[in-house]
Image (cartoon, rainbow, N blue to C red):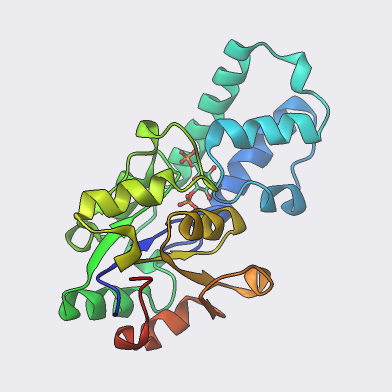
Amino acid sequence: MTIQAVIFDLDGVITDTAHLHFLAWKELGDSLGVEVNLELNELLKGISRQESLEIILKETGIFDNFTDVERQELAERKNRAYVASLESLGPQDLLPGIGDCLKDLKKRGIKIGLASSSQNAGLIIKKLGLEPYFEAMVDPRSLSKGKPDPEIYLKAAAALGLNPAKCAGVEDARAGIEAIRAAGMTAIALGQSLEQVPADYHLSSTRDLAKVNWDDIVSKE
Ligand code: B16
Ligand code: MG
């Protein structure tokens, strides 16, 4: 059996917002007198805003300097900087191959869903001009657990009206691939950093998504 839906992660798969997240976290870190470097930023990919803040504060040894309310305010401050940096985001910011891949899936009648941990995902998809492609987008606020828990992928499959075994998921981060596999979906891993991470298919970049023959992608059912 071939797959009937493809569920995409957003950051690092559809568009590269990771760099904008990085700049916003770095700005917050600078204001607190701690360094947020690219190595630390790697730990934040696919992780929710609040969990990302916790990682940064713990890794830089200042977690206990703040109350829960203050940490909430710090996360909101980072988000304001991040949302401001999305101002100029547009269709020109799609990662290579994504536009052709989405057109091909739609032409074949394969459903398309979004499983992003970002509370800004709806805004980003709109700015990229991709709203007509996505039949289901999971609101991360509705989740009790983030990736690597499978909940977000299970909810996306349910919203598309499909058994998870009939869906494939596409991710650029370890936590995301683990979530797809735990959901019982076909896992498509993107990028060199995931080469050693167990997945059903490994592609070197988003460019390769445009070359996939979806009739060859086998479902788990
Ligand atoms: P927000 P994804 C994730 O997006 C990012 O990779 C991660 O760095 C970010 O912290 C998270 O979204 C939450 O984003 O602050 O906008 O709610 O990869 O799951 O599409
Ligand atoms: Mg990602």
Residue at position x 76%, y 53% from top? Answer: 39
Residue farthest along the right direction in this orientation: 61
Is residue 3 rendered to the left or right of residue 70? left
x and y percentages locating residue 10 in the rendered image: 42, 56
x and y percentages locating residue 4 in the rendered image: 24, 71
x and y percentages locating residue 11 in the rendered image: 48, 56
**Up-down: is 83 above or below 197?**
above
- Asked whether residue 126 is in view, the answer is no
Q: For the N terminus, give its image quadrant.
A: bottom left
Is residue 100 rendered to the left or right of residue 147? left
**Up-down: is 8 above or below 30?**
below
User: In front: 70, or 52?
Assistant: 52
Q: For the C terminus, give its image quadrant.
A: bottom left
Residue at position x 77%, y 30% from top? Answer: 58
Residue at position x 68%, y 41% from top? Answer: 26
Give residue 135's quadrant in the image: bottom left
Give residue 211's quadrant in the image: bottom left
User: In front: 135, or 70?
Assistant: 135
- Asked whether residue 53 is in view, the answer is yes
